[in-house]
Image: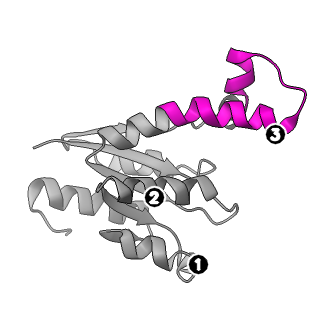
């Protein structure tokens, strides 16, 4: 049994690389949104034409990015959503809700400081982790029946 895992959320740390590196040797295909912040913000106007109004600039980018996000979440067996410490990731909360609505297995990743704010998101998840290594161990257990240690 292999897994298709979509890694959504915060783009300012290396949490994705930690999970991908930790999962070496497991039968997992990883996908994610575009994590180049500038490319993600500007893809709509770069492809579809400039917008003088910042709202429409951002809207075009969000719509183009949504094509990739919807496809990635729809195709995933497991969706991991990371909420970082520095920024409020409303898009991550939206992705978690979308994944839950599609009945996807959801793993939420955040520190203890976000526990209260994300209690409803956590309640929809099948696992809530604080460290990328815990996500790796959940995936390893699902695929191999192997506990850590």
User: CA separation, marks 1 and 3?
Assistant: 27 Å
**Kind of element beneath mark 1:** loop
Assess whether residue 62 is covered by the magenta stretch.
yes
* Mark 1 / mark 3, whichever is N-terminal: 3
Residue 55's disc is 3
Badge 3 crowding class, 10 Å Cα cut-off, few under 14, some 14 to 19, many 20 or more, is few
Quarter containing the N terminus: top left
Would you say the magenta stretch is mainly helix, strand or loop? Answer: helix
Nearer-the-camera pick, 5 or 68: 68
Is residue 110 shown left or right of residue 55?
left
In-front residue for pair 84/97: 97
Q: Is residue 88 left or right of residue 22?
A: right
Residue position marked by numbered label 2 in the rendering: 96
> From mark 1 to mark 2, how far is it between C-alphas?
14 Å
Residue 53 x, y percent position in the rendering: 88, 33
Kindly identify which residue carries mark 1. Answer: 117
**Outermost residue, bottom side:** 116
| The C terminus: image quadrant | bottom left
Q: Nearer the viewer, mark 1 or mark 3?
A: 3
Q: Secondary structure at mark 3?
A: helix
């Amino acid at each position: 049994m292999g897994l298709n895992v979509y890694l959504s959320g915060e783009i300012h740390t290396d949490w994705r690389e930690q999970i991908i590196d930790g999962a070496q040797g497991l039968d997992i295909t990883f996908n994610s949104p575009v994590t180049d912040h500038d490319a993600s913000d500007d893809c709509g106007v770069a492809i579809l034409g400039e917008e003088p109004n910042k709202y429409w600039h951002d809207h075009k980018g969000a719509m183009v990015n949504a094509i990739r996000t919807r496809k990635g979440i729809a195709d995933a067996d497991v969706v991991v959503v990371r909420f970082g410490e520095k920024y409020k990731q409303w898009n991550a909360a939206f992705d978690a809700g979308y994944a839950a609505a599609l009945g996807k297995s959801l793993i939420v990743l955040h520190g203890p400081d976000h526990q209260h704010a994300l209690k409803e998101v956590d309640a929809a998840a099948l696992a809530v982790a604080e460290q990328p290594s815990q996500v790796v161990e959940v995936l390893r257990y699902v695929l191999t029946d192997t506990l850590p240690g």
